[in-house]
Amino acid sequence: MGKNPQKILVTGGAGFIGSNLCEYLLNQGNEVICLDNFFTSKKENIGHLLPNRNFRLIEHNINEPLPVIRIGRIDRIYNLACPASPLHYQFDPVETIKTNVLGVINVLELARKTGAKILQASTSEVYGDPKEHPQKETYNGSVSPISIRACYDEGKRCAETLFADYHRQYGIEIKIVRIFNTYGPKMAAGDGRVVSNFVLQALNNEDITMYGDGSQTRSFQYVSDTVEALVKMMETTKDIVGPINIGNPHEVTLREFCERILELTNSKSKIVFLPLPANDPVHRQPDITLAKKILNWQPQISLDEGLAKTIDYFKNQLNYRERRVLAINLSYLPLIGGVELTLSEIIKSLPAVEFDIITARLDKNLPKFEKSGNANIYRIGGGSGLDKILFPLRAFLKGQKLFKERKYNTIWAKSSTYAGFAAMLLKFRFPKTNYLLTLRESTPEKRIKQLARFMPFYKLVYKKADFIQAIGSSFEKRARELGYNGVVSIIPGAIDVKQFKEEISNEEQDRLKKELGVEPDDKIVVSISHFAEQDGMENLINAASLVKNQNLKFIIIGEGRQKSLIEALIKDYGLENRFIILGYVDNPQTIKILRLADIFVRPAISGGSGITVLEAMAARTLVVSTLAGGVNDFLIDNKNGFVINAGDSKAIADRINTALQDEKLRNEFLDAAEELIISKYYWEKINSKIRNILERMLFTG
């Protein structure tokens, strides 16, 4: 650092490394401007700096033209603006690319206009999955330009190119550093990165999620060492451009790293191994010869010392914050559905978080209050037909009352309709509380559009959300159309694959067929329905009349208002001997029936989450379905099942006939579907993503 105080701009200055850098620069007597849009960072990181007269905050996205007049004259620019964890940069990969191209051009143009020296915080990810070990700056990397990580990896490579070209073409003074894994205080909880994940899970005695077998290696550097290296690089002479590796060369396997955390936290957690994500590097270790030579720098903080400080930081965060979530959903266990089961499993996986659940008392025999583990269940209503209609208002009033008794970090609405209205009203009443909206309801899109048209304030259910989790791209599209501009994370429905792998003996299969009224030689077509108009059950019945195979039984599982109408339609067609309507069936029994079946048909006209399609795939039952309700994200026609248009009964019949006649094609579809489930939709992976979102929200706001 020069003798004279400098005026310094830090983009991404409220982030993990950025906030530590801002504090360091202020302590050196400089004037610091922090520019951040708080996409992944939080004001809490810099809250203690705001009273300092030499510190200024500008809330802005670098992808937009920079507020040059507000920034004024500057001497130094540290560009740290970019989501850095896979969970964050994959939320909106296009935005990530823009940050590394448009955003970088904007900060380079600012440096060009002001004559400021500028440093680019690049990353070790530019090396990809390296074939050279350890990695030197001369290594050009091994990166896939089309992988799900490429928005960040290739984005950062492009940013380095832009820096180099601006230096050559315009003569601006640039510095490029490649930062390896950094950890320490002010890390974001729930960002999906290994240090924060392992430490929080260990402190809460939760299962520690290890991707891969733990043999992959990383090199972890404490944040104060990183900050010191950044400043040393900035203050080098003009001829020093970089890139220079900034990292700790001490290499450790993730298994060893995890065991060290367990020892330091005295945790009772056990390690759960999950499949390794695509394109995840096996090794990561910097060669810091250049940093030693040019910067006279090397890391000073040992792994044990850095981990102890990091663990203390997260301990204080846990003690400072009451970790409590107010979850709102129209129904909850023992009433079983995809939403109810997912919520229940998430609650179990976060034992250190207290959940208060507001739900309708749809069955008057259920208690008004019930405690189940770390969940308090509040059932409102009297078990009448009015309970659904009155639920939003009643849930809001109940929520208000609960807020008087305790503090919540997060309000979580499990749908945009009944639960969403209540959550939106609570967000207005308690604006500092985070509001998470999950989109996976079965409400028809036609109904959603009517709500938005005739009740304009329905759009506020989306607009007021701090974060939206959608189970498919069609739900994200809806959120955008209704005015939501924040982060949407597409996390599909999850499948507990183990339930579909349990052995079912021939004797049990025969017994189940007998209970269902199915003959030993019969083929079985299954459908699951709420018996609502959008389910399209009349199209299935019409299709059944077109299929001539008499050894074919159609089983419909479910309950609903139009059940008697469907039964009457079956009678009108004279198909009473071919249809079996079971009514409500619990989830374990439903899985057994799916595994027994040959074909699963979902003739939905609109709405739905498509979770039943994934369950059928996991059961190795061939799927015939429309694309309603986000199914287009995983069902590919003539690859892992058959896609039909809504209302096309003839197509349903034709696909059933093909599936029964072409055994080879059927097995090809089943193999492809099973591979899809195992690679993308297994329970532990999906739950881990939702847990990360909740952890993130519990530590912000």
Image (spheres, helix red, strand yellow):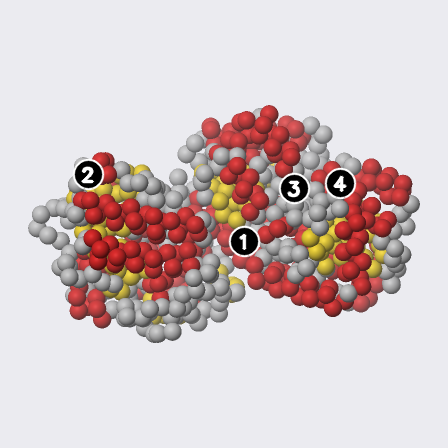
SS at badge 4? loop
Label 4 sits on residue: 531
Q: Can see residue 22?
A: no
Question: Distance from label 4 to label 1 (Cα)?
Answer: 29 Å
Q: Residues within 10 Å of mark 2 (few under 14, many from 20)?
A: few
Asked where in the image residue 284 lies, by quadrant, the reply is bottom left
Q: Position of residue 193 (x, y in %)?
A: 41, 57
Label 1 sits on residue: 687
x 48%, y 37%: residue: 484
x 31%, y 38%: residue: 59
Question: Distance from label 4 to label 2 (Cα)?
Answer: 64 Å
Question: Distance from label 2 to label 3 (Cα)?
Answer: 52 Å
Label 3 sits on residue: 607
Residue type marked 3: Gly
Asked where in the image residue 669 lies, by quadrant, the reply is bottom right
Label 2 sits on residue: 72
Whichever of callouts 3 and 4 sits on the residue coming sooner in the sequence is 4
Whichever of callouts 2 and 3 sits on the residue coming sooner in the sequence is 2
- Residue 402 vs 203, above or below: the answer is above
Q: Residues within 10 Å of mark 4 (few under 14, many from 20)?
A: many
Residue type marked 1: Asn
Question: Distance from label 2 to label 1 (Cα)?
Answer: 46 Å
Q: Are marks 4 and 1 in contact (CB under 8 Å)?
A: no
